[in-house]
Image (tube, rainbow, N blue to C red):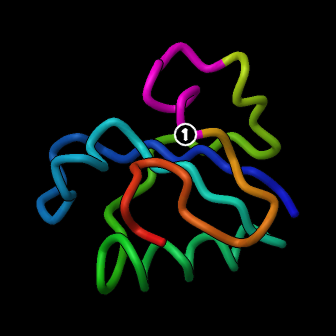
Amino acid sequence: MKRFWFEFELGNRGIPFNAAFGCGVTAPSYEDAIDLMCTKVFKGPIPKIKNVVEVVDVSKQNAKPILSEGAPPASSIWFPPGYD
């Protein structure tokens, strides 16, 4: 499993308010992470990706909500909360 942190172009419509900061995903591959976001967060195609970090070290993120959520070992959306 790999951890990914995705950031999106801010001008994109269709970004849920709680995903505007970014999305944290645990998945076997980049493609699986994209599929998971399409299915669970965006309910369709994802907005244009501005930046992606693979194998993110959650302890080094600057956002307190991310630190409080952690990153589970199974495929999941770990930020924003509520999409599992």
Q: Residue at x 47, y 48 (%)?
A: 79
Image quadrant containing the N terminus: bottom right
Magenta segment, which residues?
Answer: 61-69
Side of 59 relative to 28 (left or right): left
What percent of the width, then of the height, locates residue 58? 70, 30
Within the magenta stretch, is there residue 62?
Answer: yes
Q: What residue is pinned by disc 1?
A: 69
Q: Which residue is drawn at 45% across and 42% down?
A: 7
Side of 34 relative to 74 (left or right): left
Side of 38 relative to 17 (left or right): right
Count of numbered labels shown in the rendering: 1
Question: Relative to 51, is 43 above or below?
Answer: below
| SS assignment for the magenta stretch, majority | helix
Question: Relative to 43, is 9 above or below?
Answer: above
Question: Relative to 69, is 74 above or below?
Answer: below
Q: Which amino acid does label 1 sit on?
A: Glu
Residue in the foreground of this view, choosing between 76 and 35: 76
Q: Residue at x 83, y 72 (%)?
A: 28
Dot 1, crowdedness within 10 Å: few (<14), some or many (≥20)?
some
Q: Residue at x 74, y 68 (%)?
A: 27
What percent of the width, then of the height, locates residue 39? 43, 85
SS of the residue at dot 1? helix
Outermost front residue = 68
Outermost right residue = 1
